[in-house]
Amino acid sequence: MIDFGRYAFIFDMDGTLVDNMHVHTDAWKILLEENGVEMDTQKFLVATAGRTNREIIPEAFGEISQQRISELAERKESLYREKFLPDRKPVAGAIEFLTESRELGIKMAVATAAPNANMEFILDGLDMRQFFQAVTTAADVKFGKPDPEMFLKSAEKLGVETGNCLVFEDAIGGFQAAHRAGMKSIGIATVNSIEDILTQESVVEAHTDFTGLRAKGLIEKYFPNISN
């Protein structure tokens, strides 16, 4: 028998468990316009995906106080939550995949650059926290993705070796973080194309959603040295 408890699935949240990156885009656009900041929004979003607000905001607004960074971050996230609330739902197949993984005994964590309020908005609002033994947010790390800290901390919390972890991600920075952490990753193509995702070193396969993914099959396929 396979000891599934030796393995872990680590999930990014925004753009992976929920298809919400377009709403974050709208919220950032409003925030930048409100403050008279002109920027190529699409390039800005690609460059900042997976990073924390305390990393992103100074790059957009220049040298400002920590209090001002906090105020801008809260404004942006409140805009996001207000806009996403009517359409808040998991990515197709996610609940079924999480349920199967839990039944097998695979350990699971969320690793997100989102602030705690956004994490609660999704995981508690959609009753998804029940699936995860660990949650790591922007409040728990010094650096966002592509730094591997978030994934390494998640593995540590779960008590699973990094080489026994499989990451589920949507963002290029997230795939890079997984690679630096020594983890394989599965791409969820809510933002980037499957073709672009498959160019990333850590990525072993990519899908539009979780429909058709089987937890047992992934463990058997990507961890071939398991004991039966």
Image (tube, grey):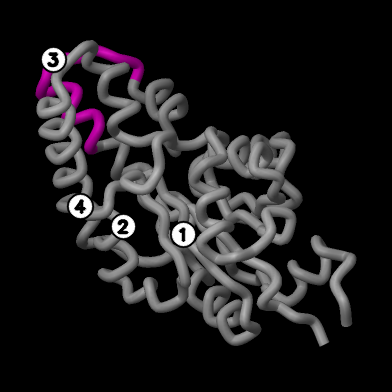
- Percent of width and height locating residue 37: 19, 14
Looking at this view, is 114 or 29 the one in front? 114
**Does label 1 or label 4 sit earlier along the sequence?**
4
How many numbered discs sit on the rendered protein? Answer: 4
Quadrant in the rendering for residue 167: bottom right
Magenta span of residues = 27-40
Instruction: Determine which residue is flagged by label 3.
Output: 36
- Mark 3, secondary structure of its residue: loop
Work out how far the residue at label 3 is from the one at label 2, CA to CA, in angstroms: 29 Å
Instruction: Determine which residue is flagged by label 4.
Output: 81
Instruction: Determine which residue is flagged by label 2.
Output: 119
- Disc number placed over residue 194 in the picture, else none: none
Instruction: Determine which residue is flagged by label 1.
Output: 110
Work out how far the residue at label 2 is from the one at label 1, CA to CA, in angstroms: 9 Å
Badge 2: residue crowd in 10 Å (few <14, some 14–19, many ≥20): many
Amino acid type of the residue tagged 2 in the rendering: Met
110 left or right, relative to 139: right
Residue at figure coordinates x 79%, y 82% from the top left:
2
Work out how far the residue at label 4 is from the one at label 2, CA to CA, in angstroms: 11 Å
Q: Please say whether residue 108 is one of the residues in the magenta stretch.
A: no
Badge 3: residue crowd in 10 Å (few <14, some 14–19, many ≥20): few
- Mark 1, secondary structure of its residue: strand
- Mark 4, secondary structure of its residue: helix
Residue at figure coordinates x 72%, y 61% from the top left:
164
Amino acid type of the residue tagged 1 in the rendering: Val
Work out how far the residue at label 1 is from the one at label 3, CA to CA, in angstroms: 35 Å
Amino acid type of the residue tagged 4 in the rendering: Arg
Q: Please say whether residue 33 is one of the residues in the magenta stretch.
A: yes
- Tell me the mark number nearer the camera, choosing from 1 and 4: 1
